[in-house]
Image (cartoon, rainbow, N blue to C red):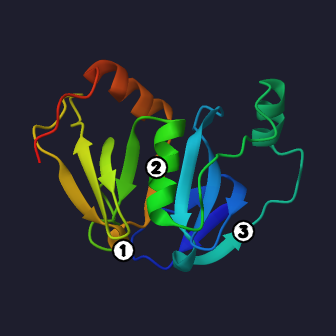
Amino acid sequence: MRLTRWIPEADRIFGFVVGVGGQWVALADVADWVRSDGWSLVRLKDVQAVKIYPDPETFTIRALKLRGEWPPQQVAVDLDDTARLIMDATDVSPLLTVHCEFERPDVCWIGAPVATDDDELTMLEIGTQAVWGRRSTRYDLDDITRFEIGGGYEETLGLLAGPMPDVLE
């Protein structure tokens, strides 16, 4: 399916819905090379339109079946509460990709959550060269429009960066 959102210049998201909650929708992502590639968690209030491709024999589904990756796995995160979603996500994958697309539709931040509450996420980021930042960054939960977890890029970035260092607030 294809999910379009109200956010100007935001990516359309392609995947398979594996969960819907009061605040978030979980989609199983499929990489360009037609392999399962983690999950996108999208704010429900931003969804504008959904296009479903009903043919169960599409190229993507056939390929995932042959690889033993069909049906897509659900992700065990709370889709009703953002702070709990973040904490659950760290049980799925140590790294989290954060998007604040109303402010920066073309940018994402990847890192390890350090703390969260009902208003804010504190995260230690990893840069594009797989180097941990020196200080944590804070994100207002109301500004976050999408999370990604469990993807191959994040996994590789984490492998190269190594264990998370001590955090300076």
- Residue at 62% from the left image edge and 66% from the top image edge: 3
Q: Are marks 2 and 1 in contact (CB under 8 Å)?
A: no
136 sits to left or right of 35: left
- Residue at 76% from the left image edge and 31% from the top image edge: 69
Distance in Å between CA atoms under marks 1 and 3: 26 Å
The local crowd at label 3, few if under 14, some if 14 to 19, many if 20 or more residues have their Cα within 10 Å, is: few
Secondary element at image label 1: helix
Residue picked out by circle 1: 142
Distance in Å between CA atoms under marks 2 and 3: 30 Å
- Image coordinates of residue 83 in percent, x first then y, are 44, 61
Residue picked out by circle 2: 87
In terms of sequence position, does the residue under pointer 1 or pointer 3 come before the other? Answer: 3
Q: For residue 59, which quarter of the picture?
A: top right
Residue picked out by circle 3: 51
In terms of sequence position, does the residue under pointer 2 or pointer 1 come before the other? Answer: 2
In terms of sequence position, does the residue under pointer 2 or pointer 3 come before the other? Answer: 3
Q: For residue 128, which quarter of the picture?
A: top left
Task: Give, as a three-letter code, the residue at label 1.
Answer: Asp
Q: For residue 51, which quarter of the picture?
A: bottom right
